[in-house]
């Protein structure tokens, strides 16, 4: 227990003054496994420092080694001032996985920046959420000022899928001001609704001024199926002024109803009520009206 000393040495003290050996070894109080050669608790618990070292402190002032270096270091702090290592690493507050080398939370949470970085932040909420910008970037912002990436990408407000590269809402929903599927590259609603024009185009307008495409196509008001290429209602319903099936190429109602004449032609008219009912004459003609003229005297 003491061996050759004054108080308790050997396994417990060995050659020192109080408890040494396994517990103290050669020091003044508790050394060896608990202290080894220092002043208070060293060795596994303190080793060579002032208070708790070794596994708990190792070489620092308070808790070092696995738990500390200087002031809670090692796994928890390592070599810094407060919590380092896994929790802090080498910085001032929480680093390593949580902070790494920065000022507040870094590593996975911050990494190298000022507040939350890494996956959650770069400088001020970056990485996946911000990456390298000022507010929310990465997937939400990427590299811009507000929300970018999928939501904004590289622009000023909402881009990417919602905006892409423009000023307000772009991409699928917008180009410059509601484009893409809704607008595409124009000024207001384009793409499917407008395409490339000024107001509603594409299916509804296409490339014109107001409603085109299926409804207007390339004209001024309603075209395409309703108007096609004329001035008012064309296409199936119109050519210039109610044409196509209803008018086609004339002035008023043509096509099936008028065809190519002046008033009602085509199946119903040729020049002035022709087609099946008139065909090519002046008023009401063809076989039905020839028979009707002699039998019923419907006209002079």
Image: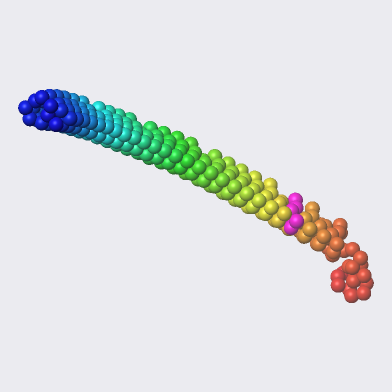
Q: Position of residue 42 (x, y in %)?
A: 18, 29
Residue shown at 21% from the left, 32% from the top: 45
Residue shown at 64% from the left, 45% from the top: 218
Q: Position of residue 296 (x, y in %)?
A: 89, 75
Q: Is residue 188 left or right of residue 18?
A: right
Highlighted magenta segment, given as a residue range:
243-250
Residue shown at 25% from the left, 34% from the top: 67
Q: Is residue 291 above or below residue 179?
A: below
Q: Is residue 155 left or right of residue 5?
A: right
Depth order, front residue of 161/14: 14
Depth order, front residue of 99/186: 99
Inspect this view and state whether residue 11 appears: yes
Q: Given the current orientation, which residue lies at the most extreme bottom position?
A: 296
The quadrant of the picture occupied by the N terminus is: top left
Q: Is residue 278 above or below residue 112?
A: below
Q: Position of residue 105 (x, y in %)?
A: 29, 36
Q: Is residue 25 left or right of residue 125?
A: left
How many numbered dots are placed on residues in this image? Answer: 0
Which of the 4 image quadrants contains residue 247?
bottom right
Q: Position of residue 66 (x, y in %)?
A: 27, 32
Residue 48: within the magenta?
no
Most frequent secondary structure within the magenta stretch: loop
């Amino acid at each position: 227990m003491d061996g050759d000393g004054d108080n308790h040495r050997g396994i417990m003290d060995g050659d020192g003054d109080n408890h040494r050996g396994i517990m103290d070894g050669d020091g003044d109080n508790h050394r060896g496994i608990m202290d080894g050669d220092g002043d208070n608790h060293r060795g596994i618990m303190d080793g060579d420092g002032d208070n708790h070292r070794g596994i708990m402190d190792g070489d620092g002032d308070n808790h070092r080694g696995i738990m500390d270096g200087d002031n809670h270091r090692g796994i928890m702090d390592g070599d810094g001032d407060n919590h380092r290592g896994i929790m802090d690493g080498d910085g001032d507050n929480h680093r390593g996985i949580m902070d790494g080398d920065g000022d507040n939370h870094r590593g996975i949470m911050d990494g190298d920046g000022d507040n939350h970085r890494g996956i959650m932040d770069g400088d001020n909420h970056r990485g996946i959420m911000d990456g390298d910008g000022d507010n929310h970037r990465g997937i939400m912002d990427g590299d811009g000022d507000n929300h970018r990436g999928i939501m904004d990408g590289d622009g000023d407000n909402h881009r990417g899928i919602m905006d892409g590269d423009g000023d307000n809402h772009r991409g699928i929903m917008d180009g410059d001001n509601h484009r893409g599927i809704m607008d595409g590259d124009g000024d207001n609603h384009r793409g499917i609704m407008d395409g490339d024009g000024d107001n509603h185009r594409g299916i509804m307008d296409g490339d014109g001024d107001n409603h085109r495409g299926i409804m207007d196509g390339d004209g001024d008001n309603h075209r395409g199926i309703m108007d096609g290429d004329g001035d008012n209602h064309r296409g199936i319903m119109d050519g210039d002024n109610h044409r196509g099936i209803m008018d086609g190429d004339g002035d008023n109602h043509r096509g099936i109803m008028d065809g190519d004449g002046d008033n009602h032609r085509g199946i119903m008219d040729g020049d002035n009520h022709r087609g099946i009912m008139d065909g090519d004459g002046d008023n009401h003609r063809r076989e039905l009206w020839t028979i009707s003229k002699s039998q019923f005297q419907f006209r002079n």
